[in-house]
Amino acid sequence: MTYTTPEKTIKILRKDDPNFMIDNGIVMTPRAGFEISNDCPRQYILMVTEAIKNGWLQPVAYMKESEYVWEQLGE
């Protein structure tokens, strides 16, 4: 039996990767982040904030490999 694995078509960018930040020449911003609803109970916000602060919860951005390549070529 043979297995074929599909080509990697998704690029994963983590906060320590050099291309995680988007720079348009005026503003630098991360590609991914966290958004907490105003309806989220305060104790959960505190837990999420603590998890981010301690590195247990980290932002990760996913891009199509083709989009990533075109972006790099455009720079």
Image (tube, rainbow, N blue to C red):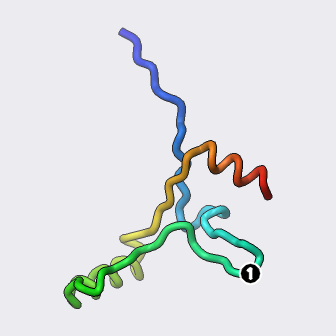
Where is residue 53? Give x, y as percent.
41, 82
Where is residue 70? Give x, y as percent.
71, 48
Residue at the image point whose x is 23% and y is 90% from the top:
42
Left or right: residue 18 compared with residue 46: right
Q: Amino acid at mark 1?
A: Ile
User: In which quadrant of the rendered view does residue 59 lie?
Assistant: bottom left
Where is residue 65? Give x, y as percent.
59, 44
Is 2 placed above or below 30 here? above
Residue at the image point whose x is 65% and y is 62% from the top:
19
Residue at the image point whose x is 70% and y is 72% from the top:
23
User: In which quadrant of the rendered view does residue 29 lie?
Assistant: bottom right
Is 42 placed above or below 36 here? below
Left or right: residue 3 compared with residue 71: left
Question: For mark 1, does the 10 Å Cα neighbourhood hold few (<14), some (14 to 19), or many (20 or more) residues?
Answer: few
* Residue furthest top in the image: 1
**Circle 1 sits on which residue?**
26
Q: Nearer the viewer, residue 55 or 19?
A: 19
Where is residue 43? Give x, y as percent.
20, 88
Instruction: Pick the quarter of the image with the N terminus.
Output: top left
